[in-house]
Amino acid sequence: MRHITTNTQPVPALRGIADTSWHARGRCHGLAPAEADRLFHPAPRAHRDIAEAKALCGACPVRQDCFTHALDNDLRWGLWGGMTEAERKPWRAQVAQRLDYARVRAALLGRDVHLSAVERDAVTRHAAMRGWTSKRLGYILAVDVEHARDLMRQARQAIADRDRYWKVPPQEHPGEEADQDAQVQAQGDAAATAVEAEETFCEVSRQIHTSTLITEFGRAA
């Protein structure tokens, strides 16, 4: 029997690793090879060529896709996304610790995107909390089932440690709602009884023992 999926979420805008269809919409598309090499692989001090290439990239509709492609594939030479290799260096240094939830969501929806180690951990924890199978996680992360099983085991252990040491409250169940309401009502009745008892004894707390009140007590005595 064929099952019809009920997933109606929109397709994420992120492109897969092997998707290079954005090349055709770039402003550099169609340049002669010699011209493209001069602009996007210039000499170290060819400042005029670099400025011309950046001006071309400034109005390019796929500039972000070009920059992301360079980071995902660790392209360290040439201009990509309007940035030189030196300008992209700080970004490359942070790629391993990147946590972009748009990428995590795209991976959960089945899109083949480049995930950092931190993003892969986020996907694994999501799978562990939702009760995914190791086979499904392996398909998402493109790893074998044995590796996915080890990742799931580590994620469950991390979640258990978090709940144990950080005192995460347990999840509430629908059947306990009535009992909790009864407990709240009982606590409210007990508090009201205590207030009535205090008013009966007419005790005055220390917080309201002002000089004026003490003077009035002295006159009454």
Image (spheres, rainbow, N blue to C red):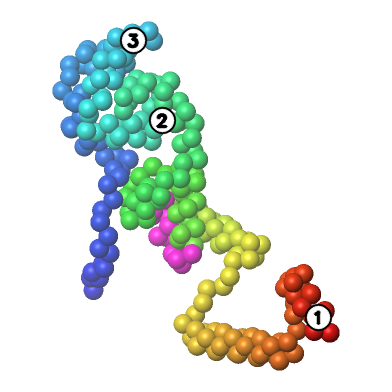
Residue beneath the point at 41% across and 26% down: 88
Coordinates of residue 54 in the picture (x, y in percent):
28, 20
Whether residue 137 appears in magenta in the rendering, the answer is yes
* Amino acid, disc 1: Arg
Q: Residue 74 carries which label?
A: 2
Query: Is residue 48 or residue 22 the one in the foreground?
Result: 48
Residue at the left extreme of this rendering: 30
Residue beneath the point at 75% across and 80% down: 204
Coordinates of residue 196 in the picture (x, y in percent):
66, 90
Residue 108 image-quadrant placement: bottom left
Q: In this view, does 177 lie above or below 82?
A: below
Q: Nearer the viewer, mark 3 or mark 2?
A: 3
State which quarter of the image contains the N terminus: bottom left
Question: Horizontal placement of 43 versus 20: left or right?
Answer: right
Mark positioned earlier in the residue sequence (3 or 1): 3
Residue 161 image-quadrant placement: bottom right
* Amino acid, disc 3: His
Whether residue 145 appears in magenta in the rendering, the answer is no
Assign a secondary structure to mark 1.
Answer: helix
